[in-house]
Amino acid sequence: MFKTVIDILRKYSLFFLLVIGIISFNLYAFKGDYRVSENVGGVSNYTKVINDKGIEENIKFDSSDLYSLDIWLKMNTLEDDIKVKLLDGSKTIYSGNIPKNDIKAGEAKEVTLRLNGEKGIKVQKNKSYTLVIKDISKRRDSSSVYLSSQKKLWHRTTYKLLDSKTIKSAAILIEIIILSFLVYLIKFSHYRKRLSKFENQFLLVSIFLIVGYALFIPVYRAPDEAQHFARAYGVLHGIFLVDSSGNINIPNNLIPVVDVVNSNYIDTIKNLHVALSSRLSSTNIINMALYTPQSYVLQSLSIGIISIVTKNVLLIFYGSRILVGILCTLIIYYSIKYIPVGKEVLAICSLLPMNVAERASLSADGFTYTVVIALFSFVIYSLRNENNITNKMKVMMYILVFFLASCKVIYFILGFLVLLIPNKKFGSKLKGVWHKLISVIILMGVSVGWLKIASRYLVNTNGGATSSEKVMFMLKHPFNYIEIMNNTLWKNIFAHIEQMIVGPLGALNIEINSGILILLLIVLVRYCVFDFKLNLRVLFIWILCLANVLLIYTSLYVQWTPALNGVSQITEIIGIQGRYFLPILPIMMVSFQLNKINNKDASIVNDWRSIVSLLVINMLVLSNVIGFFAI
């Protein structure tokens, strides 16, 4: 019996280690309860506390779990603490003091009363309670309490949605069930033969994660997602070019959340009723005006499809997130399926948390990554395929080159990967040269043409007003510019690696535990690094990747880096984020395997452990994201 148990533990050691990891991390991640704040009234007038009894106000609550109470006070002089009580008839259910040090003399300030520490108190819904605020200083006219326009005490109550124990237990249970189900499908079910193919494992895990990231990253909170949403909505309705001011007319409630950078789950709850308005208002999206309309083909298509079903703003938003993520994932699925080497590398890089989060958003970055990977996979497939490129494949190549040149100008250089395809694959050397020439013309024509159009928006971007001066500075002082790039690289290299792989997520302000970064680096090294031979093909790929990195630095230098004290005083490039390097990462890593391209066994991948590991790591990231909003 004991030997049987040991054999099972040894055989499924990874599974049990992942289960232990799920339990341990979730016990750490969920430290607080989930709460929602309810605003009542607004500040307009105030009255003085003039008697020993103080101010008494009847208030009601909408929940039985009450965590905190915020009130506004204005102290003219500070002599002593303020006494606060919450009464149920004559029974005191809360009593506490507001320290005088928490209030600045002569200024109105919101003060939070923590009820029973972090545990909260129980009340009855809609029952009337009495809030007593009393100045216990000797001078009774020293303090004042704000009232609403209805002469009611201004207050904000915070209620509990879910306690940490419940959400913690639910997360552990759900994640273990998902892990067990996946292992069952891959190892024991009658689908195991089909799921032995790596691309099918990738698709299964990806769709689940796309839905998870789409739902659990708060509304509009992916980087610049509100502006991307507005731009995609505009493209859907025929606004292909934005006015030079950057303004676009969209429904006035398309973005109902006031602070999109710091939105949370409560913003979703409060705006679930919002229906798309017919009234239009002007919104500035100058940064998104730099993107071509083609960058939003999937976003606009998804918004259009969901809009047919519902006019609810948030249902359109979340539905479009999921649909865009699934469409991008399907393209990557076929890229993994047909690439002859590096299937596991493409899958792992495409399952990095930052990558999944980008695809499960309305940002143009997810589609950009998808197009780059699709073109790269097409090129590598053509190198291995013994047959000539068909007419359908030629059309596909032109389409991919067109969209690559359209998505983000900084990645157009990767379009030159088509030059790796042997001319004979096109039927003859002359035909090969001709088709490659057409590809380069499309690549340069679209990218340079759009750059000329987009240049009119640069003056309104953060550092775009001095873009021409910065270009001249680079040309006249190339070594100075190299020094600026070098300073930027070494100052931010570790932050860029973290941002590229795991986050911060959201608007780059949802911190992810560094332990997850270490786990992902281990997986990347374990499954993606191989011995390789340096040849002209690999060297060409590396040169393109290096040129792309330089383009990323240069574009952020020209467009985003401000020249407050003159161009010559710039010492660091501002605005570079690790996620910009995501399309380059798998190309570099697959290049390590290109020496195996003629090995017929190189494409056979049956090691499901990497996919399962990425699934669990992403579930831990989602737990981290959800736990981040426990206040």
Image (cartoon, rainbow, N blue to C red):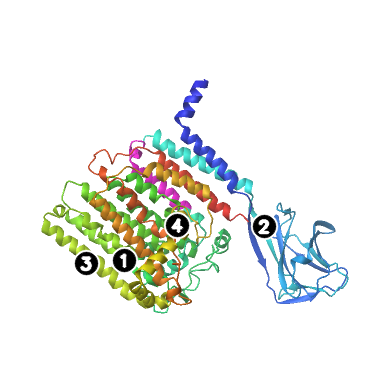
Relative to 519, 394 lies left or right: left
Tell which of 139 and 54 is nearer to you: 139
Identify the secondary structure beneath mark 2.
strand
Mark 1 lies on residue: 406
Which mark is nearer the camera, 1 or 2?
1
Tell which of 127 and 221 is nearer to you: 221
How many C-alpha atoms fall within 10 Å of the one at disc 2: few (<14), some, or many (≥20)? many
Mark 2 lies on residue: 159
Tell me if residue 199 is in the magenta stretch: yes
Identify the secondary structure beneath mark 1.
helix
Q: Quadrant of residue 44?
A: bottom right
Instruction: Check disc 4 and give the amino acid type.
Output: Ile
Residue 441, which numbered label?
Answer: 3
* Mark 3 → mark 2, Cα distance in angstroms: 61 Å
Instruction: Check disc 2 and give the amino acid type.
Output: Tyr
Mark 4 lies on residue: 493
The rendered magenta stretch, by its main secondary structure, is classed as helix
